[in-house]
Amino acid sequence: MLGDTFEDRRGERRLFRWRALFLAALVLVSLGLIVGRLVQLQVVRHEHFTTLSDDNRIKVQPVAPTRGLIYDRDGVLLADNVPSYALTIAPEKVEDLDATIAALAELVPITAQDRERFERLLPQRRRFEGVPIRLGLDQRERARFAVQSHRFPGVEIAAELSRFYPEGRHTAHVIGYVGRINEQELERIDRSDYAGSSHIGKVGVEKAHEHLLHGHVGYEQAVVNARGRVLERREQKAPVSGQDLHLFLDMALQRDAAAALAGRRGAVVAIEPDTGGVLALVSAPSYDPNPFVGGIGFKAYAALRDDIDKPLYNRAIRGQYPPGSTIKPFVALAGLATGATGIHNGKYCPGYYQLPGHSHRYRCWRRSGHGTLSMKAAIVQSCDVYFYRLAHDMGIERLDDLLAEFNFGRPTGADIAGELGGLLPSPEWKRRARNQPWFPGETLIVGIGQGAFLATPLQLAAATAAIANGGTFIEPRLVAATRAMLGAPLQPTAAVRRPIPDQDPTHWQAILDAMTDVVEGRRGTARRIRTEAYRIAGKTGTSQVFSIGQNETYNEAEVAERMRDHALFVGFAPIEEPRIAVAVIVENGGHGGSTAAPIARAVMDSWLLDRRVEPPSPSEEEAAR
């Protein structure tokens, strides 16, 4: 039938035309949007996206500064920066990591500690960056790998500067060492200034003067690909090297002081009285700080940590000991300053002292007593009863006040990290620390440097230097001068000085005369160190490790070695113009006069009689570098 097959061709053409126009309009609109977006990206926001592109393509990379060097007073290098060679692996270039490490181990020793460090660093680095598998390659190991390097794609030898301490254990407790920055240190440092640096001062001078030694980071602009690999290096800002430090420390004296201790546990501190400069600071036993720079192994560290002699413990600045009789010249000076005694006032010693109304006897070291003694004789013979009486007459408040002027009970302020302040007991301290009242007998014990009274060897040396220089406490200093760069002038450091309140010259002379007779007098407790070469003033001391009962007698031969008394000595020389003040403690050494005093004499001899080398001129020093 014709109606069923009739086609409306006109309608179809109209419908097609509308559809074509719609699609054309849609295409034009879409093209317009694309063109508009391109215009916006390429023209309107061209500068913005160019910057973003450069940020992805050009990276600012930090350049670590060179750490400052440390010298002794004569220009002897104590902390150096030396080339260090490490074997590194770039993981993306290695097909079989385990097989590569196994093959490398046939050429150079690779320990379990090396593997542990490598695996710890692996996730922290990008895959194209070298990760150290072995540090500190020597020349033979480098040569052995170089011959076989074609077998190890992705493995290479990387060079960097590493801290090195030429004097090793002789300076471990004073210079300290640097180590890898840990998480706690990251929280307190300026991360931007440590970008590119992996090490920081951990103890000693290295830590105390980190702000001078570290320097300031530089940078360089580098063109990198999408994976961060450097393709080209551009603009640079050079880093600022750390400042060099020149110390008061004398390395020859430092070695001699360590030798004088002769393997004993103890400490020696020597100070220049007029400047406060630390000439020697020795803690024994010691350790080699160099393994700590690259990361000491767990077993090696555990051996040091668990050693019964505690070589990691800095006895010179952290060892807190009862000062014993070495405190008596300071107590006598307090008695003179407060009027509690006079230079010629005598006190009777029957061998013990009793507080009024009490039966307890505080005994003198000489059971039979010393009879009637003047202040000078009491210091020379180290009579305990004289100082029991004097401490009781003064009272703890007045006694503490003057002892505090010599900086007992708080850190000296020395420019070395980790110093402790000892303990100067007082009623306030006891209430706060123990919630107990102060008893009169405790004042007597403070008067002879026992009980809760604690001092460090550095405190004793600094206080003795104040007597030697006639009444000025000077904060001990290790750094004598700094140098910003090679060829720049040395910049001396400033001393912090504080006069001791009582400046009556007759009082100071009386103490000087008494300390002189301790060594030079016929009955002095340190008379065995007397020498014709120069005159010494000093004071011996013995501090108890444990208490003795009222009716018990101390017998050194029956006491275990580590429970015996500590031996102490403080002194200075020459008397007429003091050039050195020394404090010595020998743990469980017994008697100060027979053990500690000879060590002090050896240190004084080294400084006063055996001075050998004149400090080099700046031109000679620079030539050496």
Image (tube, rainbow, N blue to C red):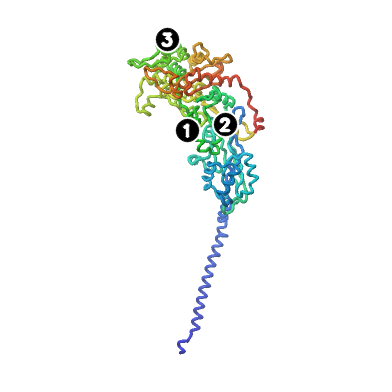
Seen in the picture, residue 201 relative to 36 is either above or below; the reply is above
Label 1, on which residue?
A: 306
Chain-order first, disc 3 or disc 2: 2
Q: Residue furthest bottom?
A: 1
Q: The residue tagged with tag 2: helix, strand or loop?
A: helix
Q: The residue tagged with tag 1: helix, strand or loop?
A: helix
**Who is closer to the viewer here, 61 or 596?**
596
**Who is closer to the viewer here, 508 or 213?**
213
Q: Amino acid at mark 1?
A: Asp
Q: Examine the image and state in which quarter residue 215 appears.
A: top right
Q: CA distance from mark 1 to mark 2?
A: 20 Å
Seen in the picture, residue 571 relative to 212 is either above or below; the reply is above
Q: CA distance from mark 3 to mark 2?
A: 52 Å
Q: Examine the image and state in which quarter residue 354 appears.
A: top left
Q: Amino acid at mark 3?
A: Thr
Q: CA distance from mark 1 to mark 3?
A: 50 Å
Label 3, on which residue?
A: 372
Q: Examine the image and state in which quarter residue 479 appears.
A: top right
The tag on residue 69 is none
Q: Residue 458 appears at what percent x and percent y?
A: 50, 25
Q: The residue tagged with tag 3: helix, strand or loop?
A: strand
How packed mark 1 is, by other alpha carbons closer than 10 Å (few <14, some 14-19, many 20 or more), is: few
Chain-order first, disc 1 or disc 3: 1
Label 2, on which residue?
A: 168
Q: Residue furthest front?
A: 106
Q: Amino acid at mark 2?
A: Gly
Seen in the picture, residue 298 relative to 475 is either above or below; the reply is below
Q: Residue furthest top?
A: 372
